[in-house]
Amino acid sequence: GLRYSGPIGPVNLHTYGVYTYAGHVNYSGTTAGARAAVLAPAGSTWSGQFENLNYGSVGAALTYAGVTVGGNFITGAINGRGAAKPAGGANANAFITGVQYASGPFTVGVAYEYIDSQGAVAMTTLTQRKEYALDIGGSYRVAPGLVLFADFIYQNRKQSGWNFATNTPGAANNTVQGRGFVFG
C-alpha cells in the first residue's frame, strides 16, 4: 500500500491506496454436499469453493477551514465486509463518503455507504446482495475528556431469494432494515 498525509497549500490531504491478496483453505467435499448444506436453490452454481481474497482499496480525505470531505472505494474478489468470495460469484464494489464540519467544541457530520457483493453463497450466480446506510451525527466537547454526542443511523440490506429471518433461500424477508439512535 501507499499513503500520503500532509498539506497541499491551505488544504490538508490524507490519502491511501492498498492492494490485498490472501489465499484460503480449499473445500474437499462434493458440490452436491456443499449445495445441500446451504439449501442452494436450482440454478445456483455454489460448489463449496471460494476464490482467494484479491481486492484494492483507495481513499482520501481533504480538510479546509473546518470542513472535511472524504471517501473510500473497495473493489475486487471479496464478499461483503471481508469474507472470501464464492467461486463464480460476483465481485464486490463498495464505497463510503461523508462530510464533517468542526468548529471549536462542535462537530457535525453525515456519511453514506453502499456495498454490492455476492452475499449468500447459496445464491451464487442467481442474485447479489445490496446494502446501504446513512449516518448523521454530532458532538459537543464540554471540557477535556467530556464529550456529548448523538448519532442516528439507517441501514438497509436486501438480496432477492434470500430470507434473512431464517438465513436460508426463500421468497420472504428479502429485505431487512435497521434504525438506531444513540446519545451519550
Image (cartoon, rainbow, N blue to C red):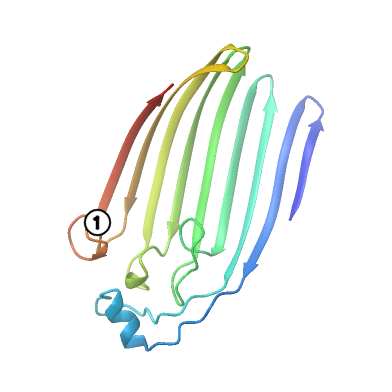
In the drawing, does residue 60 fall left or right of residue 106? right
**Where is residue 72 shown, x and y percent of the image?**
59, 46
Q: Give the quadrant of residue 182.
A: top left
Front position in the image: 179 or 114: 179
Q: Say which residue appears at 63% left-offset and 12% top-offset.
A: 104
Q: Say which residue appears at 31% left-offset and 87% top-offset.
A: 32
Q: Quadrant of the N terminus?
A: bottom right
Q: Mark 1 — residue? A: 174
Can the viewer see residue 43? Answer: no
Q: Say which residue appears at 56% left-offset and 73% top-offset.
A: 52
Q: Give the quadrant of residue 165.
A: bottom left
**Where is residue 158 shown, x and y percent of the image?**
31, 54
> Would you place residue 82 above or below residue 16 in this image?
below
Q: Look at the numbered disc 1 and give the secondary structure of its residue.
A: loop
Front position in the image: 165 or 42: 165
**Where is residue 22 shown, x and y percent of the image?**
62, 69
Q: Give the quadrant of residue 67.
A: top right
User: Counting other residues with Cα less than 10 Å from the Cα at mark 1, is it few (<14), some (14-19), or many (20 or more)?
Assistant: some
Q: What residue type is labelled 1?
A: Asn
| Direction left: furthest residue | 172
> Would you place residue 143 above or below residue 130 in this image?
above
Q: In which quarter of the image is the C terminus?
A: top left
**Where is residue 26 shown, x and y percent of the image?**
51, 81
